[in-house]
Image (cartoon, helix red, strand yellow):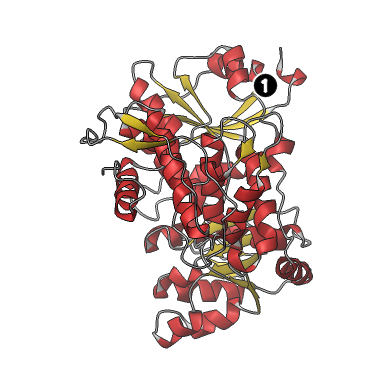
Amino acid sequence: MNASSVNVIHAVWLDPFSPIDATDRAQLSTAGISLETVSTLGDLTLALRRAHVLVIRLGDSAELLQEVQTLVAQLGHTVPVLCRVDRRRMEVAVDAMRLGALHVLSADEWAPAAWQQAVKGLNAPELKTKSYVFVDPTSQHLLALAQRVAQTEVTALLVGPTGAGKEVLARVLHESSPRARGPFVALNCAALPEHLIEDMLFGHEKGAFTGALKEHKGLFEQAHGGTIFLDEIGEMPMQLQAKLLRVLQEKKLNRLGGEAVIDLDVRVIAATNKDLKLAIEQREFREDLYFRISTFRLRIQPLKERQGDIMPLVMQSLARHGKSGLPFTVTAEAQALLQSYPWPGNVRELENVVQRAVVLCTGRTVSPAHLMFDDAMTDRQVSMSDFEVTAPQVAVSREMAGDFSPIAVRPVDEPLRPINLEHAVKTSEHQVIMAAIQSTDSRMEAAAKLGISPRTLRYKLAQLRDRGMHEGVSA
């Protein structure tokens, strides 16, 4: 099969150990994979916008994968990652999969069939399609307002709690604007130290500092003709705020170490979960920058205040994270739990809960037993007297001494009947944890199946014991 007979996959290739030769590149071309090689993180930030998949060569650990995942998240990208690992480094391959790698291939694997299988299902239209949920009346009003703001060139400040969907709204502003065909570039201002943020935003000339072996275009230049999204702008250092203000006022910049003035054609959207007016009073944020970025403020309500969005978001997430095939259904009892939970982590927490449910659900129906929330209910107390949990319960024996020691369990015959929603949530969490422990050979495997760390599992077990969920639970 040649490249012309399949959808061409654009792969960004990062291999810090050895360059790819012409023969191997031709093999991948036969598999329908087009390569763009990068050697630095600066090159990677620019290339990711065009990527369908990122291919990384790992060495003795998965540390590089973690670093790249952090960078990708900071830039606002969502790109699948495929890892290449030495055949002798099985533990690295396992770590890569646990960290979310799409696929792991041997570093000496070049067979077109193997690569076609690895990237199966990836294509440009599927990866570029993005759907948004604005079902609740509050969200519909926000969407209508955002679409009107998008038609102007004013700077917009998005305000709302962490995980509520500020970047989603920023993308709506971009995609609803005349700049929709231009790039959308995002940066989390809280995730990098000051000198790295400055370089990421404004770029540098060759020789500007030790290690600057070639020029680097900053994110403002990369966003030319499009939109730049500055998330968590309230965390930007004061010194850098002054430079950002100057760039926004003059619509020009100088790269670090350069004298040439570069004209900018960029729409700026900023976001924060902080009270910037309070930050101004405390001399943590410049008042003049605040008025420059807040020409139009859009406030995103927490998820618990827009309940009409909850189930559409759940179903969208199930479709995204679930296996291919028939769609998932959610029982009425599970829907009641999802609707009534306060979602302190907002949409980001909802994504976590859904991903755990997909892992724990052996069929296509999500029930309360598959829902594992981050925090117990403290807000609403809704009667759940009609709910009866009939799944088998297990209690952990006191042989669970070590993190990775084998686990012995004993069945508990009597079903638990929740008396209210808080108790139902705790009961559901108890069931899921015990089911994971019963189906694995060690605490480490149980934690991995639950999508949490062994330390978190220990903490959850201690909570269950303290709550008196079952006397057989030991931490």
Q: Check the image and report above or below for 184 versus 470.
A: below
**Residue occupied by mark 1:** 32
Q: Quadrant of residue 366?
A: top right
In what quadrant of the picture does the C terminus appear? top left
Q: Quadrant of residue 155?
A: bottom right
Q: Nearer the viewer, residue 57 or 249?
A: 57
Q: Residue at x 51, y 71 (%)?
A: 244
Q: Position of residue 183 (x, y in %)?
A: 67, 53
Q: Nearer the viewer, residue 74 or 292?
A: 74
Element under label 1? loop
Q: Residue at x 29, y 41 (%)?
A: 472
Q: Nearer the viewer, residue 468 or 290?
A: 468
**Total numbered labels:** 1
Q: Nearer the viewer, residue 294 or 408?
A: 408
Q: Residue at x 71, y 60 (%)?
A: 172
In what quadrant of the picture does the N terminus appear? top right
Q: Position of residue 255 (x, y in %)?
A: 49, 61
Give the farthest residue toward the front: 414
Residue 148 in view, yes or no: yes
Residue 61 in view, yes or no: no
Q: Check the image and report above or below for 85 versus 241.
A: above
Count neighbours of disc 1 (C-alpha within 10 A) and say few if under 14, some if 14 to 19, many if 20 or more.
many
> Left or right of 239: which side holds 360?
right
Q: Position of residue 299 (x, y in %)?
A: 63, 73
